[in-house]
């Protein structure tokens, strides 16, 4: 029997196990998924938790429930991968042999990496919303917040779902207006980037939306530390941003076992070929989803489109054939903008987000880079699609490869290969 | 993509003035590029530039500030002193490399 071992039972790991379970001969292959617990979180749902629109029960399910019968789920902490021996050691002493390994353990927020973040003000006036308990604690804090300086902050790129801090800003601004206290709150958006988003057309559009909402934007701000006593963010070039309530996105890093296994880069992400997702160091290790170092958004949609390409490639690779599929870095993200509306952006390695319609060119029903109610409903509906269609590995009628059809390409635009 | 003449060399640049062909770069050109953004290169600058060039040759991507500090051993604080305000962008510009991937 040949052994496929998948580390991580999140979006990418679950889809891979279920899709390959349908495609690989059950007489010849075993598929095992390893995770530390049996709680699968629908991470896009965290954004809504501080505003009370989702309860934890709506965004957490059993990992086991979503894995096909016949796929084994092993619960345990991963100690390290020993690629030369083709074995994964768990902290409790168990070891799991493999012929092929997929690393899909994602990235996690690391507040410990910024001095002062985990000090006395953590979860008092400093919050994150990239964890379920952080999002719940932030909800509590918001309910008691009625005036002062509210700062939304990104520590360093890349982060999961790079539009989420913008979405949070739009949602909190609308929420403050609804409560009639918008004029008592100074809203500031602090980013290490030189604009709201890096890709030029989307950055201008989203930056304009911040300006319209009277949100101050502080750019090129790379945080060195937080002074919890004075409640200020301090940058490497010694600028300061004071806050009464800080909503931060801490540095995102890959799993520590990746570093212990010497498989990671400086952020514990696994270097892979960006088109095949095969490790640059080992011919039988892939990394998919947020865990890899591909220059694409760390987002569920990227994991989904990458898995579509990976599955066919894997069958070829395991048969000793060249891989013919090439992942294009396709990402497709809803951006909540408050007041029951949202935008949609669709882009890849080479082409920035542009205005247009999706998924049908000129028809939609969704609108790219424009705020509509239909986009918002699409975002809400997606949670059901995620649990019931995507994770089980059923076909989703969206092409993995990005299309330019129906998009408004600016006359002077180049596809931004270096951006 | 266009060409421009810097210090007598004809080089290919993108719309922001970044070199698009790293092989057109040499140390003399780096001094001219640095001059265009008001920098006078010291040995400290060169250490960062050489790390970025070597790392790009090995990895095929421009190193981020985090990588320059953790792998290259030059503290981020110092990079902000050497290349004020926008160290990642300025360093890539002087080193004749593409801007590092920020948010994608």
Image (cartoon, coloured by chain):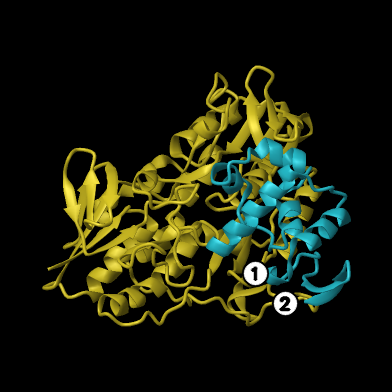
Chain colours: A yellow, B cyan
Percent across and percent down for residue A56 are 41, 41
Which residue is drawn at the image coordinates 80% and 48% (left, top)? Answer: B41
Quadrant that contains the C terminus of chain A:
bottom right
The residue at which mark 1 appears reads as: A367
On-image quarter of the N terminus of chain A: bottom left
Depth check: give the residue in front, A257 or A217: A257
Write down the residue under mark 2: A408
Q: Residues within 10 Å of mark 1 (few under 14, many from 20)?
A: many
Residue found at x 71% / y 62% = A202
Q: Earlier in the sequence, mark 1 or mark 2?
A: 1
Q: Nearer the viewer, residue B35 or A326?
A: B35
The crowding category of the residue bearing disc 2, from other C-alpha atoms within 10 Å (few below 14, some 14 to 19, many at least 20), is few
**Residue A111 visible within the image:** yes
- State the residue at coordinates (80%, 73%): B11
- Chain ID for label 1? A
Residue A127 vs residue B12, the one in the foreground? B12
User: For the residue labelled by badge 2, is the local secondary structure a helix, a strand or a loop?
Assistant: loop
In the picture, measured across the screen, residue A237 lies left or right of residue A336, that is: right
Q: CA distance from mark 1 to mark 2?
A: 12 Å
The answer to whether the residue labelled 1 contacts the one labelled 2, judged by CB atoms less than 8 Å apart, is no
Q: Nearer the viewer, mark 1 or mark 2?
A: 2
């Amino acid at each position: 029997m040949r052994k496929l071992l998948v580390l991580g039972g999140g979006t990418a790991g679950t889809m891979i196990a279920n899709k390959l379970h349908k495609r690989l001969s059950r007489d010849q292959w075993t598929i095992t998924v390893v995770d530390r617990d049996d709680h699968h979180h629908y991470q896009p749902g965290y954004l809504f938790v501080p505003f009370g629109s989702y309860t934890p029960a709506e965004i957490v399910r059993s990992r086991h429930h979503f894995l096909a019968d016949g796929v084994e789920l092993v619960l345990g902490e991963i100690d390290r991968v020993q690629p030369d021996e083709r074995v994964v050691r768990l902290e409790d002493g168990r070891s799991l042999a493999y012929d092929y390994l997929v690393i899909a353990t994602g990235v996690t927020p690391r507040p410990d990496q910024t001095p002062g973040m985990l000090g006395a003000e953590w979860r008092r006036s400093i919050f994150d919303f990239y964890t379920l308990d952080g999002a719940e604690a932030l909800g509590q804090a918001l309910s008691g917040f009625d005036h002062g300086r509210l700062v939304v902050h990104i520590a360093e790129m890349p982060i999961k779902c790079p539009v989420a801090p913008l979405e949070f800003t739009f949602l909190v601004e609308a929420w403050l207006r609804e409560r009639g206290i918008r004029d008592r709150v100074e809203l500031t958006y602090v980013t290490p980037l030189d604009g709201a988003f890096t890709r030029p057309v989307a950055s201008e559009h989203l930056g304009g939306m911040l300006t319209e909402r009277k949100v101050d934007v502080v750019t090129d701000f790379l945080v060195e530390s937080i002074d919890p006593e004075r409640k200020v963010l301090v940058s490497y070039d010694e600028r300061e941003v004071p806050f009464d309530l800080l909503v931060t996105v801490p540095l995102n890093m890959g799993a520590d076992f990746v570093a212990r296994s010497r498989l990671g880069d400086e952020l514990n992400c696994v270097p892979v070929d960006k088109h095949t997702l095969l490790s640059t160091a080992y011919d039988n290790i892939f990394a998919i989803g947020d865990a890899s170092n591909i220059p694409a958004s760390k987002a569920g949609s990227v994991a989904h489109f990458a898995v579509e390409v990976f599955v066919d490639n894997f069958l070829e690779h395991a048969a000793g054939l060249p891989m013919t599929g090439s992942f294009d870095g396709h990402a497709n993200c809803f951006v909540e903008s408050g007041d029951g509306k949202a935008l949609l952006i669709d882009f890849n390695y080479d082409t920035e987000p542009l205005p247009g319609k999706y998924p049908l060119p000129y028809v939609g029903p969704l609108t790219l880079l424009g705020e509509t109610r239909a986009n918002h409903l699409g975002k809400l509906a997606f949670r059901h699609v995620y649990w019931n269609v995507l994770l089980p590995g059923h076909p989703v009628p969206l092409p993995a490869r990005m299309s330019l059809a129906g998009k408004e390409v600016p006359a002077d635009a180049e596809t931004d290969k270096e951006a | 993509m266009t060409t421009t003449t810097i210090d007598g060399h004809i080089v290919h640049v993108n719309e922001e003035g970044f070199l698009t062909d790293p092989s057109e770069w040499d140390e003399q050109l780096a001094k001219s590029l640095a001059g265009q953004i008001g920098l006078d290169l010291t040995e400290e600058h060169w250490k960062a530039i050489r790390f970025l060039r070597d790392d790009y040759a090995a990895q095929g991507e421009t190193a981020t500030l985090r990588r320059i500090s953790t792998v290259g051993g030059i503290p981020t604080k110092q990079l902000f002193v050497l290349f004020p305000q926008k160290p990642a962008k300025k360093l890539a510009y002087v080193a004749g490399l593409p801007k590092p991937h920020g948010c994608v």
